[in-house]
Image (cartoon, rainbow, N blue to C red):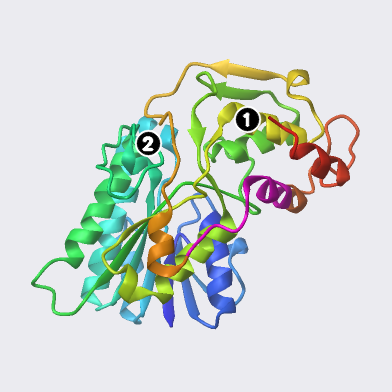
Amino acid sequence: MRIIVTGGAGFIGTHLTRRLVGDGHEVTVIDNESNSSRTNVHEGARFVFADVTKPAEIEPVFVEGADAVCHLAGQVSIVRAFDNPVADLRTNTEGTINVVRACIANRVPRLIYASSMTAYGDTTVVPTPESEPCCPDSYYGITKFAAERYVHATAERPDLEFPLSVTSLRMFSVFGPGQAWDNPYQGVLGIFLGRIQRGEPITIFGDGQQTRDFVFIDDIVDGWLGALKNASATAGQIINLGSGRPHSINELAAKVLAAHGIPVDEYDVRHAPKRPGEQHRVQADIRLAGELFGWQPKTNFDEGLLATMRWSGGTTAGDGANSTSALAEATIAGAT
């Protein structure tokens, strides 16, 4: 197929693009390199510098024709969204509307949208199924949920002159090789790993008992490919992609330190006030993905963390030894 991947130079996008190219698809990546670099894009894909907030920039790519669009472009930081809500709205919601309109204008029959666990807000139903009403309480979550609704409302329009099949994948906390560690707005795991690599303190916001559902990047890509290959089963569906297992932030810090051979009580771990819009308990109900196209995560958290450490070539604090040695493998499983 001819596939457009917006945000294809980012963390998830580069992994997805690599697999799509490997499967023989013709892939065009659209990215403005705001949090990424074209150097990360697989050499078998075509790169186009463009911004989804500017229709004139993305339209020429859509005019060429496409069988499917994987829309991952977006502003991904909850903190940045509070600092600059207008920019967040423009990128996540207006940018998605621009992509949807380009699909309509050029009769692209398939659109898969990168939605987010933040759409649920701080729900009391955990594990959280897709049927749970959404009440996002972060600006970021609001823009992602609004964009999701635009995607699905458009596909349901009776005045469209062609069938538009859409699917939204509500992704939870994705991690793995290729995740930026020098970005303070990156996911919490990337932030922790980067700080330890640089010998900087770890800051936990709140009491650290809040949980996250960490899902490995390879499993996420499997989910995207599964949705793409099973268009009839996933058309119109909103689907969770997570591990289905919760980990507290305190537990995360302990495991990451253990992977470096450092006891948690021997490192500078600090606490700060809880940040606005932060969900307290997060765990995905992932049964629907299994029912629709047989998806199940294959990589548990410890295995994923070790794979990420091997990719990073990180060092054990204090002696420069490779942290991906037997030391890390022996200690990580015992972290609490």
Amino acid, disc 1: Glu
Boundaries of the magenta span: 295-308
Q: Residue furthest left?
A: 159
Residue labelled with disc 1: 251
Q: Tell me the quarter of the image containing the N terminus.
A: bottom left
- Number of residues whose C-alpha sits closer than 10 Å to that of mark 1, classed few (under 14), some (14–19) or many (20 or more): some
Instruction: Reply yes or no: does residue 94 show up in magenta.
Output: no
Identify which residue is drawn at 22% across, 53% down. Answer: 149
Viewer can see residue 9: no
Q: Tell me the quarter of the image containing the C terminus.
A: top right
Amino acid, disc 2: Ala
**Viewer-proximal residue among 301 and 35:** 301
Badge 2 or badge 1: first in the primary sequence: 2
292 over 273 or under it: above or below: below
The nearer-to-camera label among 2 and 1 is 1
**Viewer-proximal residue among 51 and 113:** 113
Residue labelled with disc 2: 81
Identify which residue is drawn at 21% across, 74% down. Answer: 105
Give left or right: position of 267 versus 13. Answer: right
Identify which residue is drawn at 82% across, 33% down. Answer: 261
- Number of residues whose C-alpha sits closer than 10 Å to that of mark 2, classed few (under 14), some (14–19) or many (20 or more): many
